[in-house]
Amino acid sequence: MDKPIRVLVANRPRLMRELILTTFSDQPDIEVVGEVADEADIPVSIERTNPDVVVIAQEKLGERPSICDVVLRQRPDVRVIAVAPHHNYSVHYWASLNIHSHDVEASEEAILGILRSKGSPICGVT
């Protein structure tokens, strides 16, 4: 068997959290590594439990929960599933690398300029 998917459940209200925990308990490839009742405790719990996925509450439909940004900045390798407790709605959030580019003059001066810019945008291009 492959390594189990490590999940931290931090959903409110308590009844929704218990339903999610019950669903996951029947899955042999999922390991619940923790349960969080207070959203403020999520960052510390992530450090302590090292989950692959965090399940949170989606309070406002169409609006990314602020804790999602905190989680993905802290641990961009973690995926977040937000479940709306009062609607039939859920969202999967993850971080990805944005790659930027711009054309550069094919000259020694231009190449050296990029090297010396230390990642800063050249000529106002980002």
Image (cartoon, rainbow, N blue to C red):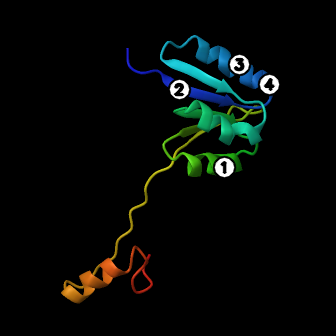
* Residue that mark 1 sits on: 64
Q: Based on the displayed image, in which of its 4 quarters is residue 53 positioned?
A: top right
Query: Label 3 neighbourhood size at 10 Å, few (<14), some (14-19), many (20+)?
Result: few
Query: Label 2 neighbourhood size at 10 Å, few (<14), some (14-19), many (20+)?
Result: some
Do callouts 2 and 4 mark residues in contact (Cβ within 8 Å)?
Answer: no
Q: Position of residue 24 (x, y in %)?
A: 59, 17
Compute the Cα span from label 4 to label 1. 21 Å
Q: Position of residue 81 (x, y in %)?
A: 60, 36
Mark whose residue sits in front, 3 or 4 = 4
* Residue that mark 3 sits on: 19
Compute the Cα span from label 2 to label 4. 20 Å
* Residue that mark 2 sits on: 6
Mark whose residue sits in front, 4 or 1 = 4
Which mark is first along the chain, 4 or 3?
Answer: 4
Q: Amino acid at mark 3?
A: Leu
Q: Based on the displayed image, in which of its 4 quarters is residue 8 positioned?
A: top right
Which mark is first along the chain, 1 or 4?
Answer: 4
